[in-house]
Image (spheres, coloured by chain):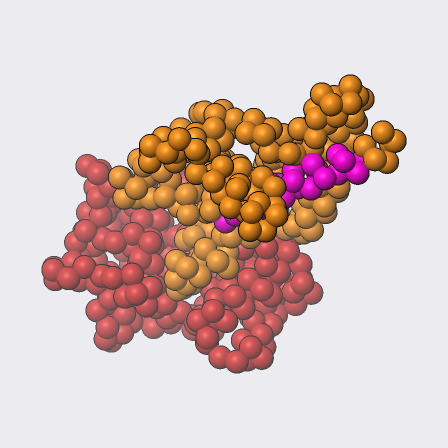
Chain colours: A orange, B red
Amino acid sequence: MSFWEVTQFLLDGFYISLLIFAVTLVCGAPLGLPIAFCSMSRFKPVKAISKVVVWIVRGVPLMLQIFIIYYAPGLLFKDQIPLFSRLDRYFFINYGINDAGRIIAVLIAFTINYACYFSEIYRGGIESISKGQYEAGYVLGLTKQQIFRKIILKQVIQRIVPPMSNEIITLIKDTALANCIVVCEIIKQANELAATKALIWPLFYTGAFYLLFVGMLTIILGKVEKKLSYFRS
Amino acid sequence: MALLIAENLKKNFGKTEVLKGISFSLEKGQVLAIIGSSGSGKTTLLRCLNFLELPDEGSITVGDKVLIDCAKAETLDDETIRQNRLHFGLVFQNFNLFPQYSVLGNVTLAPTLLKKGTPEEIEANARRLLDQVGLSDKLENYPHQLSGGQQQRVAIARALALQPEVLCFDEPTSALDPELTGEVLRVIRGLKNRDTTMIVVTHEMEFAREVADVVMYMADGVIEEMGTPEQVFDNPQSEKTRSFLHGAHEKF
């Protein structure tokens, strides 16, 4: 196989990695916000439930969570074939798409996992804003919503960009875990070449894809950080 | 008739009694200076007037409106508390400017959100106030680019933008370097000349004597002594006041 053929083959896998990355970010980042609010709730039961969920999700390996999401529905409904395998078949027969069910399982696991991590970053950011900022808003007669939206939020965003950047960079590398339920992400593709064509070098070559993408992310996130540095809170 | 009447205000934090029955009244255009050592309840009193804390007992009346009367069973909802706050302005010890807004933005934010006029009117008013506090050349700067004294002057303009009936200052110069206190005190002095009703918690005795119509000395949650600056500073009746003033004087 030529270099370009290998590149093409790996790219097919990297698109899946990027898909997992993008969906997790787009769904997980907003989902983290209500979880953060629950964790800060003054209503004790809500707070307790939220804390336990975050504890479990952050305390168990993501790979295990993928397995659980993938196999649990079948076990619950006493179905020999996992639900997501059925979805695989359904999408393949009707739309000719491979792996769709498995990818959905991975997306669910990733979104829940990352939403919990994001929620802790949000919580830290929100709690780090001084009480004086709220009080300054209160004495000016602003409502709680106005204070949060117009005063607190932007300061929180400024503070959470560095830890979020960290998490986002970890996310693209974590997509390799989709491997565990045989989703054809980039490392699975490279393994395939090792197994069928006895080619080892494509496996190492995958590193270049990650590096390139992380490099781009670093530049973009650095720009965001810089753009927000016009004020100091 | 008095503009502000506070009657028998009491406030506990847990088992600690911070305010043990504070009663006073203030005429329109008067300046009240509150002095006293830390822990005497001065700041808590201001926070009660601004509804950052709710008193446990007592009442607060502004004009002919009873803002809170703890003798009545009703609890105030958020909206009532918010409306009540608009009667007062508060300038904090550590400014609490909004860091992501420019100087002009800090002053226009609340009037804009509360729809206190057209954007043009609000901005013109903000520019006028910032001119009044001597910051016309800093409109587009952000708080972190200003000195402490300048930040505090922005905070004063921000509070004035909502035209509160009573403007409160919580140790406005305590967080400032000594050479910067003058500019802030000058602004407050200027406000007195414009008949602004003010309550100033301060450790600047000379300033209190000069600017205040009434001086209140607080100790352990009660008003130990209250009167004109001449009465309190030159002829204090209580032993506690005497020893406090003596101590404050010795620092220099």
Q: Nearer the viewer, residue B67 or A56?
A: A56
Q: Is residue A160 magenta?
A: no
For this view, does B246 lie left or right of residue A176? left
Dominant secondary-structure state across the stretch colored magenta = helix
Identify the residue at horizontal 55%, vertical 62% (top origin): B106
Q: Is residue B137 above or below residue B184?
A: below
Can residue B233 be seen by looking at this rendering? no
* Image: B163 above or below A2: below
Choose between B175 and A42: the one closer to the eye. Answer: A42
Residue closer to the observer: A51 or A181: A181
Can you name the residue that lies furthest to the front here? A93
Residue B19 position, x and y percent, is 23, 47
Q: Is residue B20 visible?
A: yes
Residue A125 drawn at (x, y percent): 50, 41
Height in image: A231 above or below A80? below
Q: Residue at x 65, y 40 (%)?
A: A16
Q: Would residue A78 appear left or right of B71 to someone viewing this image?
A: right
Residue A22 lies, in percent from the top left, at: 61, 45
Give percent across and percent down for residue B69: 17, 62
Q: Is residue B175 left or right of residue B230?
A: right
Q: Residue drawn 64% across and 34% down?
A: A184
For the N terminus of chain A, which image quadrant? top right
Placement of B80 over or under A189, stated as above or below: below
Residue A14 on the magenta segment: yes
**Image label count:** 0
Report the span colored magenta.
Answer: A7-30
Q: Residue at x 50, y 71 (%)?
A: B112
